């Protein structure tokens, strides 16, 4: 039977590329999303991949959403924690709400989803959890104390949970993307983006599919010896 993968924020941007590629690799894929019904409906219409809406920052919603998927589709074998948001601003302008919202969704979402999916993976003796961090969690970024802290937290979360899953056949890894051509990066002002691209040794933004290939590699049946690691996919921008 095909493995079942849940991809949070899986209906657009990097998540949509991950959903598509995992399906191409033979998995049954379910995509979660947070609010953009129009994009989610268009994605499902185009791909046939079911989309389930809930806020990954809401603990109970994650437990309920995953229980619904397990009853309607089957047990979750692969979890890709991809959903994320930015609320940028320098510290002196950043509100507590902007801090909290990014921590709640980006880092809290990983905890909430792992709470829902990890116990079943352990019981069945097989699982893959792949958390999408960021180059800015590794290197920091001006105007992003909230985002950098949350993404850096994801890298610590990954290494700790990897130790808990190792003996039970559950691998937990992270990917740290560099700058990828999605709506999130389109929100960066063009003069700032030009300066960022100038610092990327390969001389361009990454494509969502280039992150998806990393996820598919870590999700594979024969990737069982890779756990607690972070795969940096950033065009050489930050060598960690
Ligand atoms: P996008 O902004 O293009 O898409 C974000 C996705 O996350 C959407 O599907 C969105 O759902 C979903 N989402 C946001 N908030 C929630 C929520 N509360 N509950 C459930 N889903 C939610 O982002 P990208 O594709 O660019 O980024 C994907 C991941 O990669 C993020 O974690 C991001 O931080 C990370 N990343 C991105 C980089 C880049 O350069 N683009 C670089 C490094 C890391 P909806 O469609 O409903 O809004």
Image: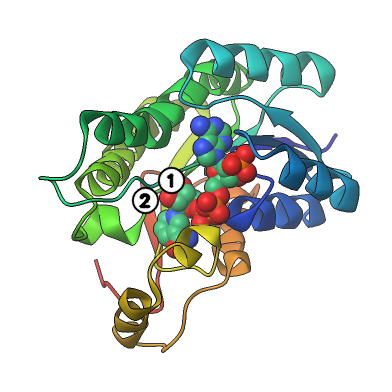
Which comes before the other along the chain, label 2 or label 1? 1
Q: Residue at x 61, y 50 (%)?
A: 15
On the question of residue 43 being in view, the answer is yes
Give above or below for 155 relative to 124: below
**Relative depth, front residue between 158 and 53:** 53
Cβ of mark 1 under 8 A from ligand 1: no
Q: Residue at x 62, y 34 (%)?
A: 35
Cβ of mark 2 under 8 A from ligand 1: no
Give above or below for 3 relative to 141: above
Residue 5 lies, in percent from the top left, at 69, 37
On the question of residue 218 being in view, the answer is no
Identify the image quadrant of the C terminus. bottom left
Residue 111 lies, in percent from the top left, at 41, 25
Residue that label 2 marks: 229
**Label placed on residue 173:** 1
Is 158 positioned to the left or the right of 128 in the image?
Answer: left
Residue 108 lies, in percent from the top left, at 38, 27
Asked if the residue at tag 1 contacts the one at tag 2, i.e. Cβ–Cβ closer than 8 Å, the answer is yes
**Relative depth, front residue between 69 and 173:** 69
Q: Secondary structure at mark 1?
A: strand
Q: Are there few (<14), some (14-19), or many (20+) residues within 10 Å of tag 1?
A: many
Q: Secondary structure at mark 2?
A: loop
Is 57 positioned to the left or the right of 117 in the image?
Answer: left
| Way the structure is coloured | rainbow
Q: How many marks?
A: 2
């Amino acid at each position: 039977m095909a493995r079942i993968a849940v991809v949070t924020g899986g209906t657009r941007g990097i998540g949509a590329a991950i959903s598509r590629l995992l399906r191409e690799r033979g998995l049954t894929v379910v995509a979660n999303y947070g609010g953009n019904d129009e994009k989610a409906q268009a994605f499902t219409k185009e791909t046939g991949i079911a989309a389930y809406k809930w806020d990954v920052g809401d603990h109970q919603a994650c437990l309920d959403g995953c229980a619904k998927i397990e009853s309607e589709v089957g047990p979750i074998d692969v979890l890709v924690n991809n959903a994320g948001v930015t609320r940028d601003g320098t510290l002196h302008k950043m509100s507590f709400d902007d801090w909290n919202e990014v921590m709640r969704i980006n880092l809290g979402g990983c905890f909430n989803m792992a709470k829902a999916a990890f116990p079943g993976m352990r019981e069945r003796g097989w699982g893959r959890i792949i958390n999408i961090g960021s180059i800015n969690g590794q290197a920091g970024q001006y105007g992003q104390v909230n985002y950098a802290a949350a993404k850096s937290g994801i890298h610590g979360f990954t290494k700790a949970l990897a130790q808990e899953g190792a003996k039970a056949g559950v691998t937990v890894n992270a990917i740290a993307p560099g700058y990828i051509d999605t709506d999130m990066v389109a929100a960066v002002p063009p003069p700032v983006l030009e300066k960022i691209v100038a610092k990327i040794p390969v001389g361009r933004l990454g494509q969502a599919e280039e992150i998806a290939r990393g996820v598919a590699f870590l999700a594979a049946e024969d990737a069982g010896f890779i756990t607690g690691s972070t795969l940096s996919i950033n065009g050489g921008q930050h060598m960690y």
